[in-house]
Amino acid sequence: MPAEGDDSEYSCCALCGTCVLQSLLVVMASLLLAYAMLDPVRVTVRDASLARLAPLNNGTAAAPLAYDLSLAVAVLNPNWAMRAVHAAPLDAELLFAGRQFCGTRLVAAAGAGRSIGPEKSDEIRMTAAGETSGSAAEVLGSDGVAELVKETVAGHLESLELKLSGEVRYRPVHVGRYRLDVTCPLRLPAPGTNNGDVVVLDRVINCHKN
């Protein structure tokens, strides 16, 4: 018959083995969650300011639409084990009342090696200033121009939006591309409503999926 000490030693070894096995299972489960469960990137806008959005030289709807806007787009990767890589150009469109009046490219094709580390964000500065090739009426439509006038008089542009479109890959595990298609409701104070000063919003604007 085994001695009492042998039983005690066997029990300790069995307990240690169980603890090691449980630890390995916890680690494996954590890795599975980290790499199998994908949390898509999120987009926010901050430091948004609008200096101008009106027919050129304060003219009529027959004049080109002049605009001057600046903001920072932040793309957040919430995953704690995977990096996010831009797999296609990241394009931005500015819209008013659902009509586009300006478009620009924020990230070049395939991201030019631009990636976002785990639980990190990539901030991209966007400045759009100029005038449309067509008249304000042609670009926004008569209803859009009327809405612009109405919201400018009210002091707040509720119909101003930023739309972003692109594609993202998640590395090192996930294959394929994931569409990035969001709209950010800017809703900025109308230019000139603060004694002529440009108002820079200090709040974060959350974008939503289209």
Image: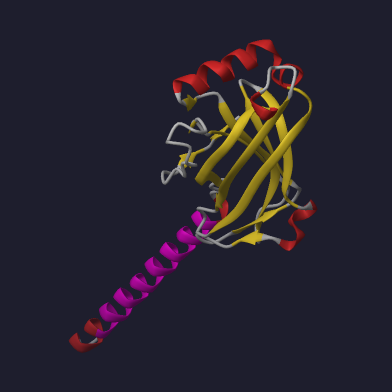
Residue 180 lies within the magenta run: no
| Residue in front for this viewpoint, 51 or 84 | 51
Query: Magenta residues: mostly which secondary structure?
Result: helix
Relative horizontal placement of residue 19, taking residue 143 as reference (left or right): left
> Residue placed at 70% from the left, 14% from the top?
141
- According to the image, what is the colour scheme of the structure? secondary structure
Location of the C terminus (image quadrant) = top right
Looking at the image, residue 111 lies above or below residue 105: below
Asked if the stretch drawn in magenta spans residue 14, the answer is: yes
Relative to 22, does residue 69 appear above or below in the rendering?
Answer: above
Q: Residue at x 41, y 63 (%)?
A: 26
The location of residue 35, given as percent across then percent down, is 56, 56
Residue 135 versus residue 26: which sits nearer the camera?
A: 135
Residue 37, x across and y down, in percent: 53, 49
> Seen in the image, is 68 located left or right of residue 134?
left
Report the front residue among 97 and 174. 97
The residue closer to the viewer here, 46 or 36, is 46
**Residue 178 in view here:** no
Residue 94 position by quadrant? top right
Residue 162 versus residue 137 in the image, above or below: below
Question: Picture coordinates of residue 176 (x, y %)?
Answer: 73, 48
- What range of the chain is rendered magenta? 9-34
Q: Quadrant of the N terminus?
A: bottom left
Q: Is residue 129 visible?
A: yes
Residue at the spot x=53%, y=47% of the render? 39
Q: Where residue 165 sits in the image (x, y, percent)?
A: 69, 39
